[in-house]
Each structure stands twice: as C-alpha cells, then as structure tokens.
Image: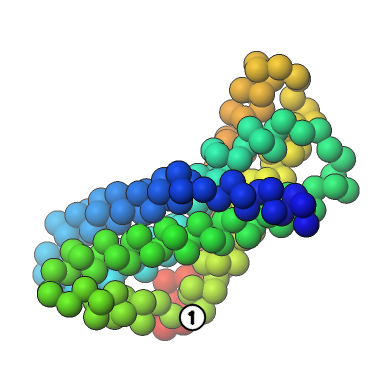
Amino acid sequence: MPTLIRRFERLDARLVASVMGTGVVVCLGFIELLRSPLQQLSRVTIELLAVRALLFLAPLLVSLLLLLRDGPLLLGGRRPPASWGPDLLASGLLSVVLLLYFMAAVIITASLMLNQGDGVAEVGFLIGQLEPARFAAALARAAAYGGICAAICLQQARRSASGEVGMASGMARSLRLGIGVMVCLDVLWTIVVDPLRMGGT
C-alpha cells in the first residue's frame, strides 16, 4: 500500500497535462489524416473513426508516456522479483487512469472539431459510440501494458550497472523492450481478437 500511495502521489498536473496534450495533438493529426482519403464520408463519421481508432492506440501511448516518466524511478531500485507486486499494480492502475484522461482529451477535441454548436451533446454522442466491450478491452490492455513496462524496468535495474551511465543504458533498453513487446502484443491482439469488430461495428 505505501508503494501504491507513493506512485499515485506522482500523478501530478504535469503528467496529466502531458497525456491530455498528447491526446489532443494525436486526435487532430488523426482527423486530418482521415479527412483527405475519406472525403466522401461525413465529418461526424470521420471524428467517430478517429475516436475509435485512438481508443485502440491509447493503451500503448499512455503506457509509453508512463514509462518515460517513471522509468528512472523504477530503475533506481534493485529489488528481488518477489517484491515487484506493488510497483506492477501501481503502474497498471496509473496506466488505466491515464487512459481515461487521454480519451477524455480525444473525445473533447473530436467534439469541438464537429463544430455543430452543442458541444455537450457532441461529447455525449461520441461517448455513446464507444461500445462497453471495446472500452473494457482498452482498460485491460492499459493495465497489462503498464505492468509489463514496470516489470521490464525492474528487470533492467537488476542488470544495469550503477551510476548515470548505467541508468541511461537501462532506460534505453527498457524503452526498446517496452516498445517491442507492446507493439507485438498489439499485433497479436489485432490478429486474434480483431478489436474493430468487437462489440459491433
């Protein structure tokens, strides 16, 4: 419990702002990317496609942001695997919370892009289009990815040399491994589960 509390105390305004800012930027870029090849579709459809696609990408993005922020903290401790549980749990829960902030930023940004006068109604419409099964799957993936990233960092802490050079080397390896593992898991998820069909069209 103390570890969990300490980690959640690091859920500060800067981290939340970084996550939400990333959500805004990625959403705007995704909408612009979709708009050109899909000009025959309505603006509402394009915004909805962006929100659904970013819900699929969000677990990976928020877990990487958490890895960048908390990686050095986890690399700074050399603990046996039996004591990793609180950190893995904390990272998983933090990823879930960050996913909610990320998707809030995406939905608000997409609703503003609709520009139809009633922002609250547009937000409600986009939230209503997120099927429970797809949203629950995204939360589960975020928790799993956060825990995996924490485990990678803790494992690298046991292998890395002490000092700034060892820390930098361990952080670089953690990033490479984290990105590689999560991308492979996303590909496997796409092949096995096909999230674009989960919970309906």
Residue 191 visible (yes or no): no
Q: In what element is the residue under mark 1?
A: helix
Which amino acid type is shown beneath numbered disc 1?
Pro
Q: Quadrant of the N terminus?
A: bottom right
Q: State the colouring used for the structure image.
A: rainbow
Above or below for 90 versus 201? above
Q: Position of residue 183 (x, y in %)?
A: 53, 49
Q: Is residue 111 left or right of residue 4?
A: left
Write the residue at 55% across / 46% down: 66
Which quadrant of the view contains residue 44?
bottom left
Of residues 82 and 123, the one nearer the viewer is 123
Write the residue at 66% across / 49% down: 7
Q: In this view, does 35 lie to the left or right of 142?
A: left
Of residues 1 and 96, the one nearer the viewer is 1
Of residues 145 and 195, the one nearer the viewer is 145
Q: Position of residue 147 (x, y in %)?
A: 67, 53
Which quadrant of the view contains residue 97?
bottom right
Above or below for 67 versus 129? above
Q: Position of residue 117 (x, y in %)?
A: 12, 75
- For label 1, the residue is 132
